[in-house]
Each structure stands twice: as C-alpha cells, then as structure tokens.
C-alpha cells in the first residue's frame, strides 16, 4: 500500500507541466521572413502535416499541392469555424489542394482550430502564431519557430493526424501545451517564474484567470492587440504574437491569454528552456513595445526598459471568437491537483508513522 501511494505521488509530480530544452534552428518574424515556410514545404521529401486556422496564401497552397503530386504525404487540418465565416478563397484553395492529392479536413469539433503548426518529414517543426494569409505573412507581427527535433516532430504530427481523424486523447508531451488539455497549467507555470516578464500577446482577457500572475511581476513589459484587463500595456493592433519570456524560459504558440483560447479551442504551443532564444525574443518584444509607444530609457538595451507604458483598452473584433465569462481566481484544476498531491503525501506519512 505504501509503494502504491508513493507511486501515485511520483506520477502526479511527473505530470506537472515543465519546459523542454530545445535548440531552435531559426526564428521567422512576420512580416520580415515568414514566407520561408513555403520553402520548407517545397523541400519536403516524405510528409507534410499542417494544422492552421485559415489558409488563404496561394503560394503555400500551391506548394502543398505540388508536394502531394510528387508523392509526398500531405495532410492539412483547417478550422471549419472562422470568425466572420470561412473566407471564400480558403474554400477555393482547399478544393484545389484536394484535387491535387492533399488530404484536407475541416474540423468543427472546437469553437476554433486556431493552431499554427507544420511538421516536415517527421523531422522539422514550424510552430507559432502566424496565419498563412496575405495579412499574416505581410503585415501582422508574430513569430514562427523552426525546430529540427525528430521526437518533437513525431509528437506534433500525431496531434495533427488525430485532429484530422477527429480522435482526441489526453496528450502529455514534455513542453507541449495543447488546448483545451494543459494550456492553463503551462501558462500559469511560466507566469509564476521569478524575474522580469516580457509578453507580446494578441489577447489578454480577465476571463483567463491569469492576469493576476502578470501584474505580480514587479517589472513587466507587455504589448498587446486587445485587452479588457486594467494593466499597463502598449497597444499594436497588428500584433498576432503569443510570446512570454521570463529568464531563460519561453512560451511560443497559438494560445492567447483568454478563456476560449485556453479552455475551448484547439491550440498548440511550446514551453522551452533556451537562453539564446529567450534573449532573442526579449529583444523582439521590447522592439514591438517601443514601436507601439512604450517608453524606454534613453539608450535602453534589449534587456532593459522603463516600467512606464501606454495604457489603452480596446475590444475590437478579432479573428478568433472571444466570449466573456466571469473572472476567475486560481484555476480550479490547479487547486484540485495540489490537493491530491498533498493528500497523497499525507497518506504516505501516515502509512510510515511509528506505531506503539
């Protein structure tokens, strides 16, 4: 019995969200060089697995169709639900891809399939927050990480293929955040790390229950497209990034800080421990922050800025549906697991007590 209780405790601790150490081949920054995604697809030899919110960028559709015609296995998962309706061009390009051998699925099991993910040859992962649209590639501000890691590639390919087949297991991949499974735990983890907080986030909403963990940082620099939270931010309505950096830890993905993104949509992101990447993304966040009106020290570097920010609140519409719910405190599932762990630990101590 003691062994069983100890095993339960260790298993619960093992399930805790934590970052993964990863080397990043390159960072694609929109609107500078995100179209390189097309080049990776053109170079594919065996397989391409794609899951994106909306696809209207013709060059990408043509590259996927060309890959399928030369014998590459190509799967594309698209959101059947898009804010404002699926664009006619997206439907046309999906039909064109299918006619050329691409396996296309319109997934409507989530309010939005909001992922931005490509897996090439089960070796290369391209993941982030840029939609493959003209505005996504040529105007919006966001990032895609290019990572060569076969283990991670196979894991993320599994998610895409399962979403294609409409099969939804509970994933537990190290460093991988999947809405609506473990995004809340992952975002909570990084927001609770000690140090200055750098955040570029398209949406920050009170209904996420996470805003309190942003403002608990004595120093934080936040640039957003829209928020209903009373926090210090610089606003850039072209921002689509979802980036959080604290120390050497980084979150990048499609998950916004909002209830729907965390608890309802299909979203995928990564928690990464990588000092070089952290420094690169800190610099990028500060650049966007400054461009959006955030004031920095005279001669401030990429690692330092003042706490003076532009405070604006906007509730303009967005490509992913936001539906307000009451603000929450500490997430209930976090409390649940803490209680379970404490009870398991107490049970182990009780079983090992000295008996008269």
Image (cartoon, grey):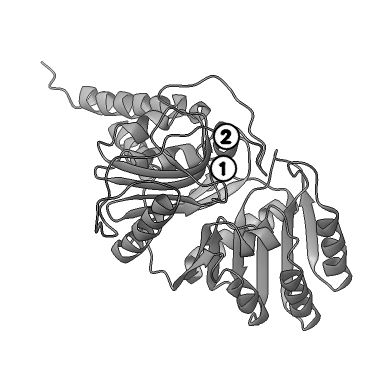
Tags 2 and 1 in contact by the CB under 8 Å rule? yes
Location of the C terminus by quadrant is top left
Residue 331 on image: x %, y %: 44, 27
Asked whether residue 261 appears in the rendered view, the answer is: yes
Front-lying residue, 103 or 53 = 53
Q: Residue furthest top?
A: 356
* Disc 1 element: strand
Q: Which labelled disc corresponds to residue 293?
A: none
- Report how far apart the C-alphas of labels 2 and 1 lie in the structure: 6 Å
* Other-residue count near label 2 (Cα within 10 Å), few / some / many at <14 / 14–19 / ≥20: some
* Disc 2 element: helix
Work out whether 230 lies above or below 242. above
Q: Quadrant of residue 44?
A: bottom right
Residue 304 on image: x %, y %: 25, 53
Q: Quadrant of residue 191?
A: top left
Front-lying residue, 206 or 125 = 206
Q: Which residue is mark 1?
A: 179
Q: Residue furthest left?
A: 356
Residue 303 on image: x %, y %: 26, 56
* Other-residue count near label 1 (Cα within 10 Å), few / some / many at <14 / 14–19 / ≥20: many
Q: Residue at x 38, y 46 (%)?
A: 294
Give the number of marks. 2
Q: From the viewer's perspective, tell me whether residue 326 is left or right of residue 2.
A: right
Work out whether 214 lies above or below 174. above
Location of the N terminus by quadrant is top left
Q: Which residue is mark 2?
A: 263
Q: Which one is earlier in the sequence, the residue at label 2 or at label 1?
A: 1
Front-lying residue, 117 or 234 = 234
Residue 102 on image: x %, y %: 80, 69
Asked whether residue 173 appears in the rendered view, the answer is: no
Front-lying residue, 329 or 162 = 329
């Amino acid at each position: 019995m003691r062994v069983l209780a100890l095993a339960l405790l260790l298993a619960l601790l093992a399930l805790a969200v934590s970052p993964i150490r990863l080397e990043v081949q390159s960072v694609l920054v929109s609107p500078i060089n995100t179209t390189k995604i097309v080049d990776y697809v053109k170079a594919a030899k065996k397989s391409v697995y794609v899951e994106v919110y909306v696809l209207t960028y013709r060059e990408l559709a043509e590259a996927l169709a060309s890959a399928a015609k030369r014998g590459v296995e190509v799967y594309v998962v698209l959101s059947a639900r898009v804010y404002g309706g699926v664009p006619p061009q997206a439907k046309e390009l999906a039909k064109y891809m299918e006619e050329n051998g691409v396996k296309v699925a319109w997934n409507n099991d989530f309010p939005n399939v909001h992922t931005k993910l490509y897996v090439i040859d089960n070796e290369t992962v391209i993941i982030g927050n840029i939609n493959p649209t003209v505005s996504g590639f040529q105007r919006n501000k966001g990032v895609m990480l290019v990572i060569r890691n076969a283990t991670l590639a196979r894991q993320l390919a599994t998610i895409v293929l399962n979403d294609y087949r409409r099969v939804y297991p509970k994933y537990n991949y190290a460093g991988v955040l999947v809405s609506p499974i473990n995004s809340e735990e992952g975002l909570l983890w990084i927001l609770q790390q000690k140090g200055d907080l750098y955040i570029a986030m398209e949406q920050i909403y009170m209904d996420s229950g996470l805003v309190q963990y942003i403002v608990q940082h004595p120093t934080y620099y936040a640039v957003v497209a829209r928020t209903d939270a009373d926090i210090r931010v610089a606003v850039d309505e072209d921002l689509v990034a979802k980036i959080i950096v604290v120390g050497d830890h980084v979150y990048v993905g499609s998950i916004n800080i909002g209830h729907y993104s965390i608890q309802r949509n299909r979203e995928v992101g990564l928690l990464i421990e990588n000092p070089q990447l952290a420094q690169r993304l800190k610099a990028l966040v500060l650049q966007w922050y400054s461009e959006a009106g955030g004031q920095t020290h005279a001669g401030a570097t990429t690692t330092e800025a003042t706490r003076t920010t532009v405070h604006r609140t906007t509730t303009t519409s967005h490509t992913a549906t936001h539906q307000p719910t009451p603000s929450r405190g500490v997430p209930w599932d976090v409390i649940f697991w803490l209680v379970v762990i404490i009870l398991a630990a107490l049970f182990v101590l009780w079983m090992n007590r000295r008996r008269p």
